[in-house]
Image (tube, rainbow, N blue to C red):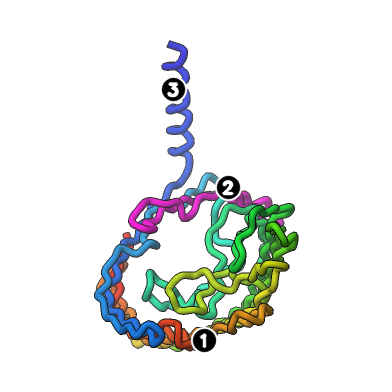
Amino acid sequence: MKKLLLIVALVAMFAGSAVAADWNFYGSARISTFWVNTDNTSTSTDTTNYEQALNGNSRIGAKVKVSDELTGRFEYGAASGSANIRLLYGTWNFGAGSLTVGQDYAPLNWFYSDQVFDGDADLLPYGGVYSGRVGQLKLAFGGFEVALVPVSKGNTGVTATSTEVSVPGIEAAYNMDFDNINVKVGAGFQTYDVKTATVDDNVASWVIGLGAKAQFGAFYMAGNLYGGSNVGNMIAVDTDADRTWDDGLAVITATKVEDTDTLGALVVAGFALNDMFNFEVGYGFAKSDFDNTSTADDKVQSYYVNSTITMAPGVFVVPELGRIDGYEDNENDITYFGMKWQINF
């Protein structure tokens, strides 16, 4: 009887808080349909495949407002066809600033491109700045935000037998508006120790970036530039054109950790013809230089042209033609054409 009364009390408490809060639900269903030609000269393969899939960034969620001081949000996605938590956080506005607790986009997430191939890649692994959604503690004051984020461990070469993390990673960004121009600057740092039978060393990662977007009537331009060391632990990098965002990492040899320096940039331009048609072109580039002399430097470029066609409010398609060049003979050259279908509800 006591358990039943406790359950009733908890349900009543939850129902009361849910009624008091303002819940705004939303969703987005996205399907990609593309023909993809992959050419690799080292393996003498040249294949063309039709790819159709539910985008992993399809989502359903809600924005919750409890009061002017307390808000929250949750969002589930469809990565690999299974439900996953994209966002789950609460934000307390304490007047001078705000504190966010939970999984959210960290400060180094800048979305300038609307490249839709590979589940809305947005040129992020080909010169963009994208550290993803992570559990964090984030403070914001006006245009400035800083967050303590989990340390991401990754390396190539000899496998570490053990790793040790002593402090969290940190990301910070400052956002500035000047009439029709928005400018962002940001930086991040993390470190962890690795041990093998012959190595006791440290992997330190840092990145610094600059981004901007300008809007002049129906025309816009945007872009960013970043550089750093072992940046693959902090932001998305795909310099070998294998459609996996796992490059830009330090190399662990038999005797030490050797750093990898990466430089990336992207630029996009677009024009809204009317409420139905928007056109965009984009180009991204990333290059990794390895301190390890036995590892060849690696670079990639990607470029595309597309058009967002709005057929009704919340209903649109985006045909796109593009290419991803791996440069090196043993890497892929990918040419693709197709369309993203999207309904927001």
Quarter-of-image position of residue 193: bottom right
Label 2, label 1: how many angstroms apart (C-alpha)? 37 Å
Q: Position of residue 11 (x, y in %)?
A: 43, 28
Q: Is residue 332 above or below residue 65?
A: below
| Range of residues picked out in magenta | 72-101
Nearest to viewer (mark 1 / mark 3): 1
The residue that appears at 37% across and 54% down in the rendered structure is: 60
Say the numbered circle drawn on residue 249: none
Could you tell me what secondary structure mostly forms the magenta stretch?
strand
Position above or below: 83 against 251: above
What kind of element bears circle 2?
Answer: strand
**Contact? badges 1 and 3 (CB < 8 Å):** no
Judged by depth in the image, the label closer to the viewer, 3 or 2, is: 3
Left or right relative to 116: residue 128: right
Residue type at mark 3 is Ile
Query: In the rendered structure, which disc, 3 or 2, sits on the residue that comes first in sequence?
Result: 3
Q: Is residue 229 left or right of residue 111?
A: right
Mark seen at residue 7 = 3
Q: Which residue type carries mark 1?
A: Val
Q: Residues within 10 Å of mark 2 (few under 14, many from 20)?
A: some
Q: Is residue 286 left or right of residue 78?
A: right
In this view of the protein, which residue sits in the foreground, 235 or 111?
235
**Which residue occupies the foreground of this view, 160 or 213?**
160
Q: Which residue was labeled with disc 2?
A: 70
Along the line of sight, which residue is nearer the eye, 176 or 19?
Answer: 176
Residue type marked 2: Leu
Which residue has dot 1 on it?
Answer: 267
Q: Nearer the viewer, mark 2 or mark 1?
A: 1
Cβ–Cβ under 8 Å for marks 3 and 2: no
Task: Give how far apart the Cα atoms at labels 1 and 3 are.
Answer: 56 Å
